[in-house]
Each structure stands twice: as structure tokens, then as C-alpha cells.
Amino acid sequence: MSAGQQHADVIVVGAGIAGLAAARALLAAGRRVVVLEASDRVGGRLRSVDGLDLGATWFWANEPRVHRLAAELGLATHPQHIAGDAVMHAPGGARRMAGNPMDAPCMRVGGGTQALAGAVARELGDAVRLRHAVSEISADDDGVDAVCDTAMFRASHLILAVPPALAAARIRFFPALPDELRRLAEATPVWMGPVVKVVVRYARPFWRDAGLAGSGMSHEGPLREVHDMSGPGGDPAALFGFAMPGPGEPPPAPGPVLAQLMDMFGPEAGRPSGVHIQDWRAEEHVSPPGVEHLGAYGLFGHPAYSRPAMGGRLHWASTETAPEFAGHIEGALAAADRAVMAVNDQISAST
Ligand SMILES: Cc1cc2nc3c(=O)[nH]c(=O)nc-3n(C[C@H](O)[C@H](O)[C@H](O)COP(=O)(O)OP(=O)(O)OC[C@H]3O[C@@H](n4cnc5c(N)ncnc54)[C@H](O)[C@@H]3O)c2cc1C
């Protein structure tokens, strides 16, 4: 134990929604918690700019944890706009479809999903330490240490709420993780890590005038699918889409994106008030190098992630480790629940 070490009952690595929710539940159970977050903001893959989601957008009726969390935090939610016809974009032009097979009914968080993370982080106060990238985790018989550039932390348990493949690439473990677990972590894809999300903002949701839903599918690209991203009542007004460039290919430029949207929704689509291009491959605290090559999605929720590692001191909690809804916000919350239960059980058993 060194003089500069800070102590807690539980260290949470990562202030995405999994880490934040885990910390919130542990605090409610009376634990001393510190949340170490590498970047200068909370939320991870929940990222909203000017009320528009550059990461996760939707949650669904069968996802009780997200509904409950939004309600507990007092956040407004609203239905995704799905009324109108979708558009099929194919060689030779765009074709209006009858109805909207692209979108299922789902919900959105007012102001964007990052509000979920922001509201939890406000509850946690100075337990959340931004710009604290963990580079080393070591466990011994008495506890676990997390090492950042400028500080060291010690606790009896650690919840690792970052994508396993990223943890395997960026964090050194002492003792080393067993080979099988390390290989599993290295091979587990990062949900949406290979994706570029493009959000295009407009003065008004003009596509609705023509009875269009703002959604569509494209075999031409650069966006493979498009959806309405507008807020309640069409304010702010926006469309968004996903692109998946091949390994090493750059993200799509605004010009080709606007040309595609004009093909699909008419000339007004060429006059945006803003274009955001969010390349999740380039987010160093979400995607490890080569994220495009990870394709074994069957590893999501692998039983090994439900077993504490490092002598029972390390607990996995990113959405990829979730026993159910892996990949979704709901999955991140389910993984957090599982990790918190394991930590509380072990602490209770040892006192
Ligand atoms: C484009 C896109 C669209 C999506 N759409 C949806 C959707 O519509 N609905 C849905 O349910 N889900 C969606 N998702 C998935 C959803 O965003 C994730 O399931 C969820 O946000 C994952 O949360 P998490 O806490 O598990 O991980 P993350 O959000 O990745 O959080 C991990 C955190 O750990 C931090 N970190 C990383 N390394 C370190 C380190 N060494 N030390 C300290 N901190 C570290 C990161 O900075 C980050 O804050 C989408 C994701 C993307 C990218």
C-alpha cells in the first residue's frame, strides 16, 4: 500500500451507463465507491450533442431497466417518430414504400440518451473522476489496485465496465488473466464500435410534409439505413443514418451523405443547418485497434463474464458481458445489476 493511494470499497472502471448504474446501486447499498473514467465526459457510447444522439438513441417496451432508470431520474421520454412511408434507395434512384417497415415503435430520452448518464453522474458527485484512464489492475489476497497516470486506488472489489476487447488491449493485469479469459475478452466484439453514425440537422422536419417517415434503407450508401432523429414535435429536426466503412476506409464525407439524402427525401435535404459525423472506430476509449475485425457476436454474455476473475475481485460489467439484452443500454444496466449483486454478496459474506 503506497502513501498516495486512495481507498474505496469498490472501484468502478468506466463511466458509461453500466459503470454509472453500478456505482449508483453500490452507493445506495452504503458502499464507498470511486468511478474512474478515462475521457473528459461521462456516458461513453451515450453521447448527445445539441440534443441529438451520436451514440445510442432508442429503448424498447420490453426493456424495464431503462424505463425505470429514466423514471427514477425524472427524465422526460418520448416516442420515436415512425409515422409515414419509408424510402428504398437502390441503383437507379429512390422508391417510396407503402408504410414504414424500417422502424418499430420505441422510446427516446428527451435531450438525448447522454442525459441518463449525466443525471446519474450528478447523483454520484465527486465519486466520478474524469481523465482517469486505468492502465493497470492488480489483485492480491487482500484487495485490488487500479493504477492511473496520476493516482492509485485500492478497494476490495473492482467492476470493469469497459468493453472486454478494449480492456484486453489497454489494461495490464497482475496476475495476468487466464489465457482462456484473455482470448475471450480479445475476441468479443464492441457493439457498434465499427460504425459511423451521421446526424444531419435541419430547420424543420420537411420530409413529414410529404408524408414520409424520414426512414429508409439503401443499397447505394454511404448510409445503409436512415431514421428520423427529431425531438418531440419535430424540434430539433434531424435525420440520422449508419455507415460501415471497410477496415482502413475513411468515414463518409458530408457531400456524398447529403447527395444520398437528396435522392431519398428531395432537394431540401441538401440544405442542412449542421452535419455531425461520429466515427466510433476512432474513439480510443470505446474501440480497440482493429475493432472492425471482431465479429464473434455469439460471445456476448459469455458465462465466463458472470464469474468474478482475479481471485473473485474483478467483476465484468459492460453491455457486451450482459446475460440479456447484450449490446443495448438495457444490457449495460443488466450487466451492472449482475456485478453489483456479486460484489454485495461477497462483501456481506466476508463481514
Ligand atoms: C452509434 C451507436 C448506436 C447505438 N444505438 C443504440 C440504441 O439505439 N439503443 C441501445 O439500447 N443501444 C444502442 N447502442 C449501444 C449502447 O450505446 C451501449 O450498449 C451502451 O451505451 C454501453 O454502455 P457501457 O457502459 O457498457 O459501455 P460504454 O458506453 O462504452 O462505457 C465505457 C466507458 O469506459 C470508459 N473507459 C474505457 N477505457 C477506460 C479505462 N482504461 N479507464 C477508465 N475508463 C475507461 C470509456 O470512456 C466509457 O466512458 C448504440 C451504440 C452506438 C455506438
Image (cartoon, rainbow, N blue to C red):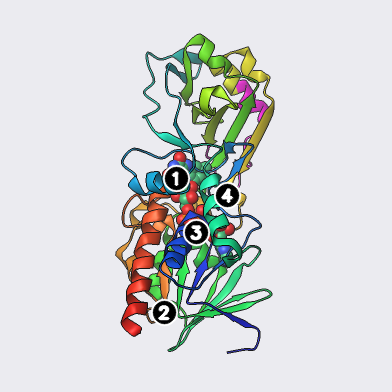
The three-letter code of the residue at mark 4 reads Arg
Residue 22 higher or lower than 327, as above or below? below
Location of residue 351 in the rendering, given as x and y in whole percent from the top left corner:
35, 84
> Secondary structure beneath disc 3?
helix
Q: Nearer the viewer, mark 4 or mark 1?
A: 1
Q: Which residue is mark 2?
A: 310
Residue 70 marker: 1
Alpha carbon separation for disc pair 4 and 3:
23 Å
Q: Residue at x 56, y 30 (%)?
A: 222
Q: Is residue 189 magenta?
A: no
Earlier-in-chain disc, 1 versus 3: 3
The three-letter code of the residue at mark 2 reads Met
Q: Nearer the viewer, mark 1 or mark 3?
A: 1
Q: Which residue is mark 3?
A: 20
Q: Are marks 1 and 2 in contact (CB under 8 Å)?
A: no
Magenta span: 243-259
